[in-house]
Image (spheres, grey):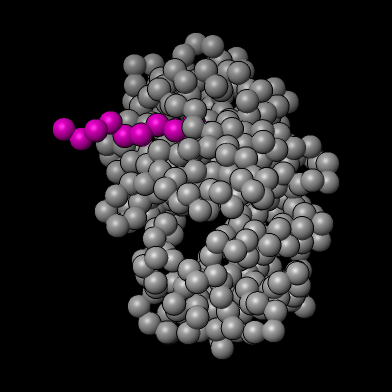
């Protein structure tokens, strides 16, 4: 069984980014990322209605970290502490050494390889520090940007589930990608 | 959101079978099903070793039933109350009206279409009585008998997860099948 410990918080630094712990000071940015129509187009979850909902989300992220059930990083550009997105390893399946990756990025910063840089940093952390064996991603089949990102990061499409997810009055399909540890 | 209530327990009768609630008197059969190497071969669970553990397992199934977490039917032949296998709807994703089906059978009774008969009636019950929209099955691709059961029941293979499960340090793949509810008329 996988054992993890997310305390102290593992801040990750890449060429252009600092991936740090999420704090209540990120509430405005978190609210935008969880309510903006363009950002959540393929997230298939009800948009946040208030800053308080964003704060509840930040609290849940912290609870998950303290319970060692998942970890989420706030993405910032080096030299600017403002949150521009977040990336997470969650739904930890400890018996099977597996986790799910999730990510979201402010539209102004998309198309610059920032999410790929962030994703590669947390995958490296997941495989080499956490000792995960596999990471999966669950996306809306229409989300081409997400699909491109996963393929660039080396993920392989393993499933297309028909009508397995209900949101907003419709049953939607899901595509599942996965990446196995490079440590084999 | 799907509202789930498994009580009163839905006993189901088919041509040859009675699917009933598991009870403490089934503990010896549970001990067999959860310790026999042929049964456990593809399941990836440690065998249980005592009647006491089997009784604790029956208690867990009862708790899951009462709490609306999952439902397991004991499979019996008509006229003989002895449990020969189980079939379950578990891992309910209530927001998405989806559940997973799991099943296990005493080797003496395999190859007679019994699990097929149980699966047809349980999937039908899941769709028509419980409001499910889809049912998923996760099968070790090496388990040919299990693949046959789901395929014969009309399940479609939708995915193949590499190294999905770990048992005693060894990873194995899982084929994921699903069956969608027949269209409402």
Q: Quadrant of residue B166?
A: top right
The residue drawn where x is 40% and y is 38% is: A162
Q: Is residue B178 in the magenta section? A: yes
Instruction: Look at the image and give the residue range highlighted in magenta.
Output: B177-185
The foreground one among B170 and B85 is B170
The residue drawn where x is 58% and y is 44% is: A177
A55 shown above or below B183:
below
View extreme (top): residue: B112
View extreme (front): residue: A112
Q: Is residue B116 left or right of residue A80?
A: left
Count of numbered circles on the image: 0
| x and y percentages locating residue A51 in the rendered image | 42, 84
A130 shown above or below B7:
below
Q: Is residue B53 visible?
A: no
| x and y percentages locating residue A97 in the rendered image | 72, 50
The foreground one among B85 and B155 is B155
Q: Is residue A80 visible?
A: yes
A110 shown above or below B165:
below
The foreground one among A131 and B137 is A131
The residue drawn where x is 60% and y is 49% is: A150
The residue drawn where x is 39% and y is 16% is: B16
Q: Is residue B130 in the magenta section? A: no
The foreground one among B124 and B86 is B124
Query: Which quadrant, please, contains the C terminus of chain A?
Result: top right
| x and y percentages locating residue A81 in the rendered image | 64, 84
Q: Is residue A173 left or right of residue B27?
A: left
View extreme (left): residue: B185
| x and y percentages locating residue B125 in the rendered image | 32, 34
B159 shown above or below B81:
below
Q: Quadrant of residue B175?
A: top right
């Amino acid at each position: 069984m996988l054992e993890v410990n997310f305390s102290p918080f593992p801040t990750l630094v890449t060429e252009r980014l600092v991936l740090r712990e999420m704090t209540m000071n990120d509430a405005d940015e978190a609210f935008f990322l969880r309510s903006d129509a363009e950002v959540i187009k393929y997230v298939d979850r009800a948009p946040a209605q208030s800053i308080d909902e964003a704060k509840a989300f930040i609290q849940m992220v912290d609870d998950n970290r303290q319970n060692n059930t998942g970890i989420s990083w706030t993405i910032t550009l080096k030299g600017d502490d403002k949150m521009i997105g977040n990336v997470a390893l969650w739904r930890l399946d400890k018996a099977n050494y597996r986790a799910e990756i999730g990510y979201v990025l402010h539209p102004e910063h998309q198309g610059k390889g920032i999410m790929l840089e962030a994703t590669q940093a947390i995958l490296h952390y997941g495989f080499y520090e956490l000792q995960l064996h596999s990471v999966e991603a669950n996306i809306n089949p229409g989300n081409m940007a997400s699909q491109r990102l996963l393929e660039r990061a080396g993920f392989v499409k393993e499933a297309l589930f028909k009508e397995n997810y209900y949101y907003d009055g419709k049953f939607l399909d899901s595509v599942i990608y996965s990446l196995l540890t490079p440590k084999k | 959101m799907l509202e789930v209530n498994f009580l009163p327990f839905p006993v189901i009768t088919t041509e040859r079978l009675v699917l009933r609630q598991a009870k403490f008197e089934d503990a010896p059969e549970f001990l067999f099903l959860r310790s026999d190497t042929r049964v456990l071969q593809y399941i990836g669970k440690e065998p249980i070793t005592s009647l006491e553990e089997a009784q604790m397992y029956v208690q867990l199934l009862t708790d899951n039933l009462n709490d609306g977490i999952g439902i397991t039917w004991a499979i019996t032949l008509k006229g003989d109350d002895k449990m020969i296998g189980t079939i379950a709807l578990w891992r309910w994703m209530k927001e998405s009206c989806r559940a997973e089906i799991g099943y296990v059978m005493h080797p003496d009774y395999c190859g007679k279409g019994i699990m097929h008969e149980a699966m047809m009636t349980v999937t039908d019950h899941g769709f028509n009585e419980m409001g499910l929209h889809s049912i998923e099955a996760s099968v070790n691709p090496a388990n040919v008998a299990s693949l046959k059961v789901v395929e014969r029941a009309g399940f479609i293979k939708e995915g193949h997860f590499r190294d999905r499960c770990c048992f005693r340090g060894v990873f194995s793949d899982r084929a994921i099948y699903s069956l969608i509810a027949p269209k409402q008329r």
